[in-house]
Amino acid sequence: MIDAAVNEGGTNVRSDRRLAWWLLVGGLIGLVAAGTLLVEKIALLKDSNYVPSCSMNPVLNCGSIMKTDQAEIFGFPNPLLGIAGFAVVATTGAAVLAGGRLARWYWLGLQAGTVFGVVFVAWLVFQSLYRIGALCPYCMVVWAVVIPTFWYVTIRNLHAGAFGERAQRSAASRALRSWHAPPLLAVALLLVVLIGEQFWSYWSTLL
């Protein structure tokens, strides 16, 4: 996603377009996942005996998660946050691909949204693994979209100077542009290890 051609505003045109494709596609994937979760949640509210499509076994079990307080941490179903957030993400990607040049304040607003999203996802990961003891496949799709979205929006904003000229020219900014993939792979590996370790007693029965 990092390229060398920079336009007059300091942003990388090709890099922004690659990010835009991710925002559009990732936003739509997240929107579908969040929408499906909301539909399943509504069905469960209507019928307490309803078994969601993502309840596959004792570990991959959306139903047990949907019935917890963590599923409505702000007083309404969490998927509503996802629907609103992913709609903005997908729309941003479409706008950039259509040739739009978004203002610095907009990118900073998107940055704030992705920071909230990644912190919320980290909290949900902890709750799923160590408090609820189950995983939601659709939620995991959301995790897989939110984390790289936060990461690449942050790198883009550093590179474009949204955080200021000093941050733009810093060694950390240059390093992140050159080595953007390894941190994401490390996070993915960490999640796999944590899931494997926490639910090993179940996974081992499948071997």
Image (cartoon, helix red, strand yellow):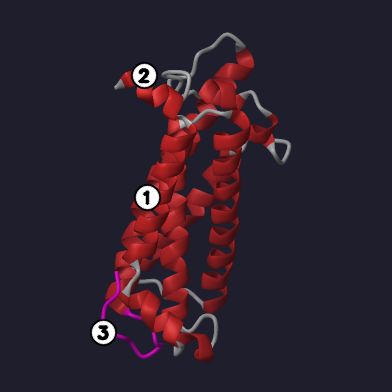
Compute the Cα span from label 3 to label 2.
52 Å
| Rendered view: 17 above or below 91 | below
Marks 3 & 1, CB-CB < 8 Å contact: no
Residue at 42% in and 54% down? 187
Q: Nearer the viewer, residue 124 or 154?
A: 124
- How many numbered marks are there? 3
Q: Is residue 201 magenta?
A: no
Residue at 54% in and 21% down? 63
Q: Amino acid at mark 3?
A: Ala
Say which element carries label 1.
helix
| Rendered view: 52 above or below 150 | above
Marks 3 & 2, CB-CB < 8 Å contact: no
Residue under pointer 2: 205
Compute the Cα span from label 2 to label 1.
22 Å
Q: Earlier in the sequence, mark 2 or mark 1?
A: 1
Q: Which residues are magenta?
A: 1-12
Residue under pointer 3: 5
Quarter that holds the C terminus = top left
The picture places residue 175, in percent across and down from the top left corner, at 37, 79
Residue under pointer 1: 189
Q: Disc 3 or disc 1, which is closer to the eye?
A: 1
The picture places residue 107, in percent across and down from the top left corner, at 51, 71
Say which element carries label 3.
loop
